[in-house]
Amino acid sequence: MRGVSEIAYRLRKSHIIRYLLPLFTTFLVISILYSRSNIEIGTNDLIQKHRWAHEDEDSFYFTYSKKFKMPAYSYNSKKDSNKNWLFFSSKQEDVIPQSHIAHYDLNKLKSTANAAVDKEQILILTPMQTFHAKYWENLLQLTYPRELIELGFIIPRSKSGDNALKLLEREIKKIQTGKKEQRFHKITVLRQESPSFNELGEKQRHALEVQKERRAKMALARNELLFSTIGPYTSWVLWLDADIVETPPTLLQDMTSHDKPVLAANIYQKFKNPDDNNKIDIRPYDFNNWAESAIALELASKMDNDEIIVEGYSELATYRPLMAHLYDQNGDINAEMHLDGVGGGCTLVKAEVHRDGAMFPNFPFYHLIETEGFAKMAKRLGYEITGLPNYLAYHVEE
Amino acid sequence: MCKSIFKLLSGNPNTQKRTTNSSISLISILGSIFSLLLLVRIILVNTSTRIYTPDFKNTPGVEYYDLQNYKGNKNGWQMGDRIVFCVPLRDAAEHLPRFFRLLNNMTYPHNWIDLTFLVSDSKDDTMGVLLDNLKSLQSNKDKTKIFGNIEIFEKDFGQIIGQSFSDRHGFAAQGPRRKLMARARNWLGSVALKPYHSWVYWRDVDVEVIPDTIMEDLMHHDKDIIVPNVWRPLPEWLGHIQPYDLNSWKESGGGIQLANTLSDDAVIVEGYPEYATWRPHLAYMRDPSGDPEVEMELDGIGGVSILSKARVFRAGSHFPAFSFEKHAETEAFGKLSRRMKYNVVGLPNYVVWHIYEPSSDDLKHMEWLAEEEQKRLEESKIREFYDKIWEIGFEDVRDKWSEDRMQVLKNVDPNKLGRNVFVDWSDTDEDYEQDEENLATESNSKDANNEEAPVFVPEILGEDAKLKADFNPDEV
């Protein structure tokens, strides 16, 4: 009782409560009523008076109701809007080809064993984080006609990328402003948009935990490069890593003559052997070229969807036959072997394989990633993967 | 604050110590903020924006692109984002004029739109019609209405399934058909995409109604991949309208369960009772009077009108021509892009109207409808003929009868009681006698009996009848 009388007393005394309380109550009541009328159909409108949308729009075929307005778009150019005192202009104008009408008959595009004679274009793609002078020298000593070679580079968004780009720019200018018959057909240099593929240091590069992330980024870089540069006249794509420094001069002719959809050379490394008077010796380098094994398949079937299998780790013993170990010094250089996974060191791919959609997955695709995932995808599309165990390309010594 | 600054600036000697302290602290705060901004600017300039750019302007055959510049802005029409239109064509000659009319009405700056076409396995004159239309499109006198680069590709993939076969075995034929279409799309996509494109727009030619601002409407949502809802008009006897594109859906538990039971190469297709997935379809989410800006997350998408950032395709997403997670083509494109961590969104209340192509069942029904109409026409012709014969062969007495009927029935009306019938017998006796005599004298005349029968003249008959009754044939 005392409480009630106190409230009554306060009400009488306090002006704020006296005026605000009734106001607040009415507001509450109104708001409740209003919100109810919005929720339930027919509380504010008779059901007989209900109109279907098409009656209001005078048609069944309207794209959206006139009840709502789409935003009014302004067409004032804001191309230079990122020029302000804080950010300067971060965007550089690239030269974009002007309007043209072009017509290509892709039915005539072929990739055959007789590539050089048939004048088939080869696109050499290289993700480049460091520029090795030997890589460039090796590229220049290839005997395939230069007017049939197109080059593509993708460079990470980083300091080391900047350095590589500067060196590359110098060499490109040298060759492209030189004699006409010495020039390459076309060179495309791209700056990577996705996260840099070389952010991780050299030492931890091969640790299993970082392997997945590193190769996912690498896959993105490869895809960006591939799908920006592959043209309507490209017959072959050669994936040549920036650290491949020695190949036979007839590399392109040799590899195309096999006429295989996907063909990988064996990647070895030359080094000074301390056990043998520092004589130059060779050792296997790229373990991503392999044939599938039952053990690896069983391993994969037990894995989570997001886990990957990579070669060269004792935690993941797959017992796959690795092409790197199958090199025979006295064997036939043209010997072929069937593969299920490939590396990107020096791999020749018919353009149609990529055009059909075979790309480098940046996610575990059947527990495989990047180039190995690419091989799996190509197989899913019905192409076979082949390796040349006795045909060597050399990786730079780190 | 302002007062204290003013006091400080005016150098009032009477300024108290407290005020001075607060003004000094104020200045120091302002100064530190300013220097912080400067520092941020220096850091930003040094880290993010100062990357090396080579200069290949005077080097023939060399191109340099920083892909960061082509990520796609949500107001691309102001930023000069280039869009590449990818349009797969097959036997599309009849649809092309409509397509180009819609294209020409688009409000997105035409100069920044590149067009690419893939013409495959066409039996009609698709290429000729395409070239004609392109010529007239690009010869527009208004320079702002001219489109950017145009590339036409030809590639035949061959048809795995004949049309009649697919009609009979629609379900079984879906998988291989979708895989083949995916190949065609990938061939187009891979050659169409250039480093300087920011957006990719996939569009079917057979669209009937589409807003002119379609690019802006889709783009301003700032999603990696976005599709509108697709419906189609229907004839009246089919109920006017129908959701068309059932390939845009969100994955369901039922769908995942079904996928787990299928073989690695199987392709799930929507709209067949064999594969009941219970997925929520974008098409059925439409509220005709709803907000067109509403978004819906999707897993599989349809290919009628897809706007995607170019970076999605650059990163390797494409239309799988194999069974990817038990799907192929556009639906698998949605799934693959989701797998690659891109967002895939549909607009349930924003509708693009596909044209109506009658299905084989519809055609049958339309044939039946046409037959019925023909029958009706023939019948009416015959009826007309019979009517004419009737008119000529018979006298129409129906009008007269309706009058007479009244007169006749009036007298037998049983409802009128107590009718006063007056008969004037005054001169009949004479007549009777006369008749007796006549009968005796002219016994051979048989007809006379009738003629001379007494005339019954009821009172109630009208004047006319009276006159008739008064008429005595004998007097003639």
Image (spheres, rainbow, N blue to C red):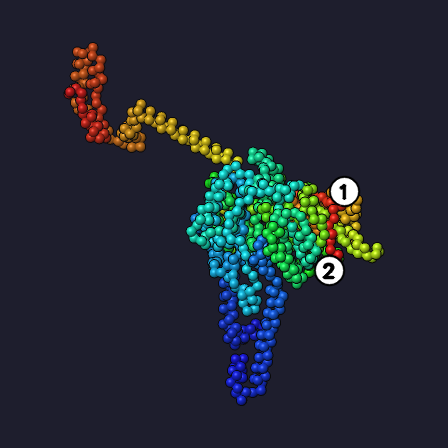
> For the residue labelled by badge 2, is the local secondary structure a helix, a strand or a loop?
loop
The quarter of the picture where the C terminus of chain A appears is bottom right
Judge the density around disc 1: few (<14), some (14-19), many (≥20) Cα neighbours within 10 Å: few
The amino acid on which the numbered mark 2 sits, given as a three-letter code, is Glu
Residue at image position (34%, 27%) is B387
- The answer, for residue B240, to whether it is visible in the render is no
Helix, strand or loop at disc 1? Answer: loop
Return the mark for residue B294.
none
- A316 and A228: which one is in front? A228
Above or below, comparing residue B463 to residue A82 in the picture: above
Q: Which residue is mark 1?
A: A332
Where is B442 relative to A74, above or below? above
The residue under label 2 is A202
Of the pair B24 and A11, the residue shown nearer to us: B24
Question: Tag 2, which chain?
Answer: A
Which quadrant of the rendered structure holds the N terminus of chain A?
bottom right
Disc 2 or disc 1, which is closer to the eye?
Answer: 1
Q: Are marks 2 and 1 on the same chain?
A: yes
Is B424 placed left or right of A249 in the picture? left
Q: Mark 2, residues whose alpha carbon is within 10 Å: few (<14), some, or many (≥20)?
A: few
At 16% from the left and 22% from the top, the residue drawn is B427
Chain letter of mark 1 equals A
Outermost front residue: A179
Residue depicted at 31% across the width and 23% down the height:
B393
Mark 2 and mark 1 lie on one chain; the one further toward the N terminus is 2
